Image (cartoon, rainbow, N blue to C red):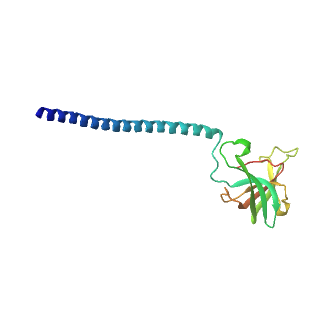
Amino acid sequence: MKKRIIVSLIIVSIIIVSIISLIIGFGMGKISEKANQQVKISQAQEEIDLLKSQLETVYPPLQEEVYSIDGTVTEVGDKFLVMEAQIRVSQFPLPEGKDYERRNIKVNVIEETEIFQTEIVAPKVSEEMPLEPFEKVLLSFEDIKTGDYIMVNSEENIKGKKEITAKEIQIVEGGIHLPY
């Protein structure tokens, strides 16, 4: 009878040790698997960062601050105008031009706002080519008409704003588009 109890205790001890060993082995395996996953995640993040930096050389990120905008005048009011601007909304090209959005922006014109147009300076026959080939021709607010293509500079960050105050307004002949 004592032999049976001893044999039973040995069997129970072996079973308990086996269960504990399995639990410890399972736990160690999970810890090892988690460490491997962390290494893989870290490697994947490094790859993503590398690819992102390579893409940014071709597609620079959107500007955090914007101080100038251009577009077409759609309305001229009393000391303000409304312009339709094409705003870049995606760092990457999207199908059907969805990386740009058209927005109407109200431009307030104050007394200090400089309104001008640039003209090419033609050198006189006896003179050398001027250092600055363009000259500002000052205009008045009344010279701005619906349909004019303008570039507006502001002293404040205008990114995302629907109403801005102009420091300078340049009327552009031919309407070159420079989206922000």
Relative to 47, does residue 108 appear above or below in the rendering? Answer: below
Percent position of residue 137, x then y: 82, 56
Percent position of residue 94, x then y: 69, 42
Q: Residue furthest left?
A: 2
Relative to 124, does residue 67 appear above or below in the rendering? Answer: below
Percent position of residue 19, x then y: 28, 36
Foreground of the two, 133 or 63: 63
Relative to 179, does residue 54 appear above or below in the rendering? Answer: above
Left or right placement of residue 1 versus residue 172 in this view: left
Left or right placement of residue 21 versus residue 132 in this view: left
Left or right placement of residue 140 versus residue 155 in this view: right
Foreground of the two, 165 or 82: 82
Residue 2 lies in quadrant: top left
Q: Residue at x 48, y 38 (%)?
A: 41
User: How many marks can you see?
Assistant: 0
Q: Residue furthest front?
A: 1
**Does residue 136 appear anywhere in the picture?**
no
Foreground of the two, 161 or 116: 161
Relative to 144, does residue 21 appear above or below in the rendering? Answer: above
Q: Residue at x 71, y 41 (%)?
A: 95
Residue 146 lies in quadrant: bottom right
Q: Residue furthest right?
A: 125
Foreground of the two, 155 or 121: 155
**Does residue 3 appear anywhere in the picture?**
yes
Q: Residue at x 66, y 46 (%)?
A: 90
